[in-house]
């Protein structure tokens, strides 16, 4: 590929790779109308619940701020509904009983 051809192709290729990465992270980043919860978020819910239930801490990292915001809202919803606390109590009771 000639040098000038590569220079014109590189921004398009990088944009496509970025979009693919966003799509894999959270489809709503590309398609705001997407309302389904990504499968990895559902899996993460269970992991967070288990970690919090075991009185441990967790750090969640993402390349995209909007993904972190969505996860933060999800955790806040679980806390406000009492789901995290209820599961934590159930695990504590099961360990002691």
Image: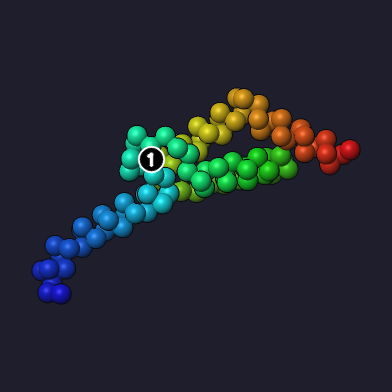
Q: As displayed, is residue 62 above or below residue 90?
A: below
Query: Looking at the image, how many numbered discs can be counted on the residues?
Result: 1
Q: Is 51 or 97 nearer to us in this picture?
A: 97
Colour logic:
rainbow
Q: Is 86 or 7 nearer to us in this picture?
A: 86
Residue plotted at (71% across, 39% down): 53
The x, y position of residue 5, in whole percent, is 12, 68
Going by the picture, which residue comes out furthest to the right? 97
Residue plotted at (43% across, 49% down): 25
> Is 51 displayed left or right of 64 in the figure?
right
The x, y position of residue 77, in whole percent, is 56, 28
Residue 11 is drawn in which quadrant?
bottom left
Q: As displayed, is residue 88 above or below residue 1?
A: above
Tell me if I can see residue 30 in this picture: yes
Per the image, label 1 sits on a secondary structure element best described as helix
The x, y position of residue 49, in whole percent, is 65, 40
The x, y position of residue 46, in whole percent, is 63, 43
Q: As displayed, is residue 79 above or below residue 56?
A: above
Residue plotted at (50% across, 32% down): 73
Residue 27 is drawn in which quadrant?
top left
Tell me if I can see residue 68 in this picture: no
Q: Residues within 10 Å of mark 1 (few under 14, many from 20)?
A: some
> Is 65 displayed left or right of 51 in the figure?
left
- Residue to which mark 1 is pinned: 28
Residue 18 is drawn in which quadrant?
bottom left
Residue plotted at (60% across, 25% down): 80
Q: As displayed, is residue 32 above or below residue 39?
A: above
Give the quarter of the figure containing the N terminus: bottom left
Going by the picture, which residue comes out furthest to the bottom? 1
């Amino acid at each position: 590929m000639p040098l000038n051809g590569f220079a014109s192709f590189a921004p398009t290729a990088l944009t496509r790779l970025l979009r693919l990465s966003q799509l894999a992270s959270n489809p709503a980043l590309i398609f705001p109308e997407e309302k389904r919860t990504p499968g990895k978020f559902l899996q993460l819910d269970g992991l967070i619940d288990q970690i919090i239930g075991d009185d441990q801490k967790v750090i969640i990292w993402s390349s995209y701020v909007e993904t972190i915001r969505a996860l933060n809202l999800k955790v806040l919803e679980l806390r406000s509904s009492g789901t995290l606390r209820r599961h934590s109590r159930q695990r504590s009771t099961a360990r002691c009983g």
